[in-house]
Amino acid sequence: MTHPSKSDRLEETVVLGASDLSERLLFQLATLPPDGDLEDGLWALVSTFADGSEDLAVGLCVPQGLSDQLVIRHAPRPSRPRVMDAARLFPEATHEEVFPIPHDEGSTLHIGTDDPMDVLLRRNAEQVALAVSAALRRHRLVTSLKREVQEVEQLRSQAVQSDKLAGLGRMAASIVHELNNPLTSIVAYADYLRRRWEQQGAEPSDRERLGRISEAAGRVLTFTRDLVAYSRPSSADPSAMNIHDVIERALLFCEHVIAGTNVTLVRTYGDLPPVRGLHGPLTQVFVNLVTNACQAMEQDGGKLTIETAYDADRRVVAISVLDEGHGIQSDKIDRLFEPYFTTRGDGGGNGLGLNIVQTIVASHGGTVVATHNEPKGARFVVELPTGR
Ligand SMILES: Nc1ncnc2c1ncn2[C@@H]1O[C@H](COP(=O)(O)OP(=O)(O)OP(=O)(O)O)[C@@H](O)[C@H]1O
Ligand SMILES: [Mg+2]
């Protein structure tokens, strides 16, 4: 019987040892949950390598973002003081070698030993570095996929909401359309009766009452016609417009809201260049802002100021709607533009107004910001680019 020579045996041990570690690493990689915690996964790989080697210290440094890094230390002896330096993880060991992790810039594997590293250990370290590289790549891929799935979810729910809003718009338009016919009859018959009574010499007070019916119905009719026009889907291309006309039209829509409160309207209009946009949606922006301002002043009344100004340097038209109402609580100010955020509970509000405002303003390339109005109330500033 022939015995293998010492060098043969060593070779055999080297090959067996290496493949054994590969298998264990492969097994660890295969059993790591795809969306599991990164630190747990890396610990499992490091332990697979370090377990059983009593004097071996194994560590990892993985940069996370610009200033942070994940450090893993699997050491037989604690370091004193505790070290988190990417250049030297095991100052207590006599030797420390650093291996770059392939395909992951900045990430390193650290091996601390008392004796200089031999070929086998170095080869094993390279295998661990490869396994860590695979785990990191998988983790980064899963993280970016998760982010994308979240973004798609968000877009989907925005689409559902836009759809609901479009449905609400269609419903409002059809209600207004239905109101149109009876209102036309009311105006026509009231006029007819008034004329008859004028001819027949009826009571002057009755004639005046009929006049009021006719006038009130006429106003509602104008309002509903305008409303249908402005809720019609905007097939129109954007056109240049004077934003003051848009505001005035919005104020007309809000006449009844303003009249129902003790609000004094103040216009401080500047000299503005035209803005390109869609008349209907922009009207809706100011209808919502003015309505909100009036609702905030429902209790105590106050001054509703509409200020406009042109910032020539930034080429934007700024429209501020200021009120002296109950104001906005500081912890709520960031949430105002969220869909369905409302403090007017019990059916008072849907929490959609400001979300619609923001969507329309953004579609015109502008911004809308809410701040506190000093000393009292709220201020909403819409900025629209003039493009010149
Ligand atoms: N001028 C304002 N002053 C104080 N709070 C305001 C003002 N405008 C809006 N808010 C707050 O922002 C919330 C959201 O406003 P938004 O217009 O989106 O919804 P809403 O007015 O509650 O309901 P609706 O869908 O009928 O407009 C309001 O419930 C209110 O709390
Ligand atoms: Mg509102």
Image (cartoon, rainbow, N blue to C red):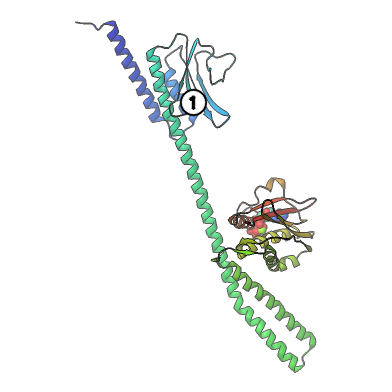
Q: Quadrant of the C terminus?
A: bottom right
Residue 226 location (% of width, % of height): 63, 71
Relative side of 49 to 309, left or right: left
Residue at x 75% of width, y 82% of height? 209
Residue 382 location (% of width, % of height): 67, 55
The verdict on label 1 being within 8 Å of ligand 1 is no
Quarter-of-image position of residue 296: bottom right
> Callout 1, which amino acid?
Ser
Give the residue pinned by disc 1: 107
Asked if residue 286 is positioned above or below residue 196 in the image, the reply reads above
Quarter-of-image position of residue 297: bottom right
Residue 310 location (% of width, % of height): 71, 56
> Does the rendering let one see residue 148?
yes
Q: Nearer the viewer, residue 368 or 27?
A: 368
> Does the rendering let one see residue 345?
no
Residue at x 72% of width, y 87% of height? 194
Label 1: element kind: loop
